[in-house]
Amino acid sequence: MIIKPYRFAGLLACLAVVSTTGCSSMMSHSGPDQGYYPGTRASYETITNPESGWVMRPLAAVDLPFSALMDTLLLPWDYYRSGSDKAADSPRERILRSEKQNGTAASLASAAPLTTAH
């Protein structure tokens, strides 16, 4: 069976839209535990934030239902991770641990002061 070109183009367009949605959910699940429905909350906050750009609001509006669906599918994973310590996984805490382990503060304290030439 041969698909007519305009139907094929429509199918490709629909697949492109579906494949690029749910981004907020996937991004929020790749980091530390952020509770339940983090992608949906992120999309909603982008839509309602008056400082969001005019490009981001419509993209977040399109992403919202797909992020809600993805967050629903990932509820068992969120439940599994719900008992974990969120602070230990945060990027800030990892950087602080790394600096402490490598003695960054001591190295910076013994470094020569920064001078600027006028």
Image (cartoon, grey):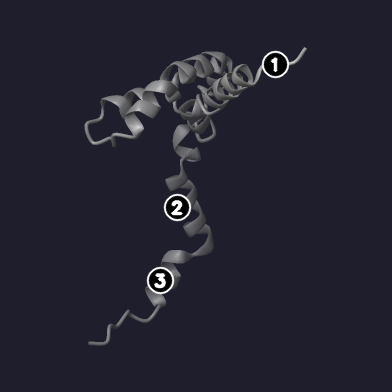
Q: Are marks 1 and 3 in contact (CB under 8 Å)?
A: no
Q: Quadrant of the N terminus?
A: top right
Q: Are marks 2 and 3 in contact (CB under 8 Å)?
A: no
Location of mark 1 (residue): 3
Location of mark 2 (residue): 96
> As displayed, is residue 42 above or below residue 109?
above
Separation (CA) of disc 2 from disc 3 = 14 Å
The mark that comes first in sequence, 2 or 3, is 2
On screen, residue 21 versus residue 5, left or right, reads left
What residue do we see at 66% from left, 17% from top? 4
Location of mark 3 (residue): 108
The mark that comes first in sequence, 1 or 2, is 1
Secondary structure, mark 2, is: helix
Separation (CA) of disc 1 from disc 2 = 57 Å
Secondary structure, mark 3, is: helix
What residue do we see at 40% from left, 77% from top? 110
Separation (CA) of disc 1 from disc 3 = 66 Å
Residue 34 falls in image quadrant: top left
Residue 7 falls in image quadrant: top right
Look at label 1 and name its amino acid: Ile
Q: Is residue 42 visible?
A: no
Look at label 2 and name its amino acid: Leu
The mark that comes first in sequence, 1 or 3, is 1
Query: What is the x, y in percent for residue 109?
Result: 38, 72
Q: Nearer the viewer, mark 1 or mark 3?
A: 1
Rendered image: mark on residue 69: none
What residue do we see at 48% from left, 39% from top? 88
Look at label 3 and name its amino acid: Leu
Query: What is the x, y in percent for residue 35?
Result: 44, 23
